[in-house]
Amino acid sequence: VKEYEIMASQPFPMGMSIGTERNSAKTTTTAIEKLLHKLNHEDMYDLTILKVKNHGILPTVNGTQMNRVLNALLQCNTIQVLYIQNVANGMHDEQLRLLMSVLRRGKIWALNIGESWHVTRQGWEEFARDLPSTNITHMYASEGTNLTATLKKQMMTAARRNRRYDKRHYNKSNRNVIDKVTNMWFNPHASAKYQNQFHASQRKFKTGMVTY
C-alpha cells in the first residue's frame, strides 16, 4: 500500500476534500523523500538549523513518515537546532520517544516541538523526565495541549541545568547559529552572558587592547 493511500485513510481537516487530501499526501511523500536524501547526505547540505516545514513537510504527515525522518535524524551529526513543530498528525507518543533517542545523542541543543496536539499527558511526562539526559539548553513546546504548566516548568528547569554543561548556546564562535535561533521559551542570543562577550570585545577594541 502506498504511503499516500495510507494517508488518505486518515481523518482530514474540515473543509478539505478527499482529492485535496490525496494531493497533499503525495506532496508530503515527495517532500519526505527529498528530506531523507538530505539527511542521508548531510555533508552536502547546511542542516545546522533544520526546520522541517521549510522542507515541505505538511501538518498532514503521518506517524510512519515521521518515523522515517526521526530514524534518519538518529544518524545525523551536523544538526544543532531542530524545528519540528506543526506536524501534529505525525507526532504522537511513539514519535516523541523516538525524538528523545535523537536528542540523547547530544548533537542538538535547541528544539521547537510546538503544536504537538496528539501527544498524551503520559508522553509529555516521560519526555520531561528524560530531558536532563539530553543536551537541550533551549526549547519550546506549545501550551494548551496535554503539556501542563507543571511539566513546562520541569522542562525549563532541565534546560537551564543543561546550560552548565553544553556551551554552544553562548560560545561566540557559534554566533552564526545562535543569532538565528528564535521562537524558544528563551532565545539564546538574548542572554546577558552571550551579549557581554561582544560588549567586552568592543571595550577592548576602543581602548586599543585588541587590534582586529
Image: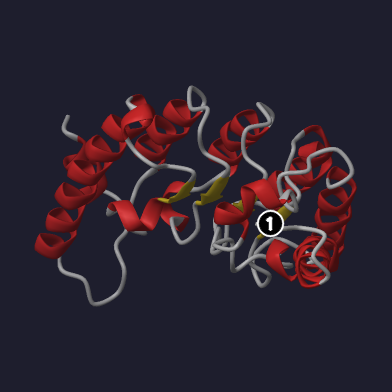
Q: Quadrant of residue 100?
A: top right
Tell whether 76 sits left or right of 41.
Answer: right
- Give x and y (percent) for residue 68: 38, 30
**Residue occupying the point 76% across, 66% down:** 205
Q: Looking at the figure, which quarter contains the N terminus?
A: top left
**Residue occupying the point 78% across, 73% down:** 206
Residue positioned most to the top: 75
**Residue occupying the point 37% across, 35% down:** 64
Tell whether 31 sits left or right of 204.
Answer: left
Mark 1 surroundings within 10 Å by alpha-carbon count, few (fewer than 14), some (14 through 19), many (20 or more): many
Q: Looking at the figure, which quarter contains the C terminus?
A: bottom right
Residue positioned most to the bottom: 15
Number of marks: 1
- Give x and y (percent) for residue 45: 33, 37
User: What residue is shown with label 1?
Assistant: 139
Q: Is residue 112 visible?
A: no
Q: Is residue 53 visible?
A: yes
Q: Amino acid at mark 1?
A: Met
In the rendered view, tell whether residue 17 sits above or below residue 2.
Answer: below
- Give x and y (percent) for residue 53: 37, 57
- Give x and y (percent) for residue 174: 63, 48
Secondary structure under tag 1 reads strand
**Residue occupying the point 69% across, 45% down:** 123
